[in-house]
Image (tube, rainbow, N blue to C red):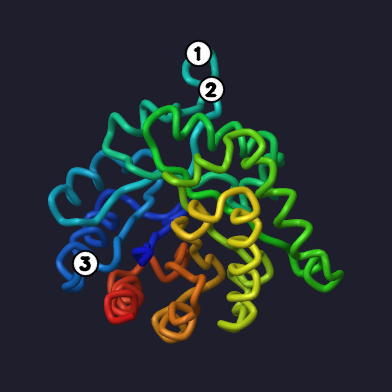
Amino acid sequence: MRQILVAGNWKMNGSNAANQELIDGIVAGVPDGDGFQLLVCPPLPYLAVVAASATGSGVAVGAQNVSEHEAGAYTGETSAAMLKDVGCEYVIVGHSERRALYAESSAQVAAKFVAAQAGGLAPILCVGETLEEREAGTTESVIDEQLDAVLDAAGVAAFDSAVIAYEPVWAIGTGMTASPEQAQDVHRHIRERVAAKDAAVAAKVQILYGGSMKGENAPGLLSMQDIDGGLIGGASLKASDFLAIADAAAGN
């Protein structure tokens, strides 16, 4: 049985004081149980501090982005080894905001995925479609292109130590949320796409829902067969909201 992963993406929010209050609140409220994992992904400057505060709590720490390069003259970039060195276990790659705002191609995302694993991190690969793509009926082909770029670059076995997150871009920060059935349909497609390469890997890989999961809708989403957790944005910025999703994961 796949473990549920509840991952909080804090995006470009927070301060030393706010982040300390947030991680302290999360650590203090971790539900009992062993069928789930909590993860927080703070902004880069706060990673080491948050990781230190989370030590021994069972809450893992990840980064929001990583360079595809191992080292060198890449001003402003951060390597996987550096992230690992300050306490990260995971890193998000290919988030819809990185693809849209910073023009990251699927080829670059695949290179970051490979670099993350080479540096000892578990990548969380984000895939998903815009509203226009969904309305055009191209959801599956868009996701296939994003996923296949990584499968071709890294090989299907790489997903033994990676996570996939489905982001319906149209449901991020808009107040819209995919129904559990809509989300399940895409999650099932993703798993089947991986299974075409290796059924055992597909059965094991965690696929998270990344489209405005909250405490209220988490139970329904997490009850779906192929939804193995959430990549949480806004609801991860308040301990009580994040822990409400964690409670749903613990009771699922």
The quarter of the picture where the N terminus appears is bottom left
Q: Is residue 46 above or below residue 154?
A: below
Left or right: residue 120 versus residue 170 is left
Q: Which of the two discs, 3 and 2, labels the residue nearer the N terminus? A: 3
Do callouts 3 and 1 mark residues in contact (Cβ within 8 Å)? no
- Mark 3 or mark 1: which is in front? 3
Question: Can you tell which mark lies on residue 72?
Answer: 1
Which sits in the foreground, 117 or 27? 117
- What amino acid type should be assigned to the residue bearing mark 1? Gly
Q: Which of the two discs, 3 and 1, labels the residue nearer the N terminus? A: 3
The quarter of the picture where the C terminus appears is bottom left
SS of the residue under disc 3: loop
Residue at the image point whose x is 69% and y is 49% from the top: 146
Q: Position of residue 36 (x, y in %)?
A: 29, 66
Q: Position of residue 54 (x, y in %)?
A: 19, 51
Residue at the image point whose x is 69% and y is 41% from the top: 149
Do callouts 1 and 2 mark residues in contact (Cβ within 8 Å)? yes
Question: Can you tell which mark lies on residue 34?
Answer: 3
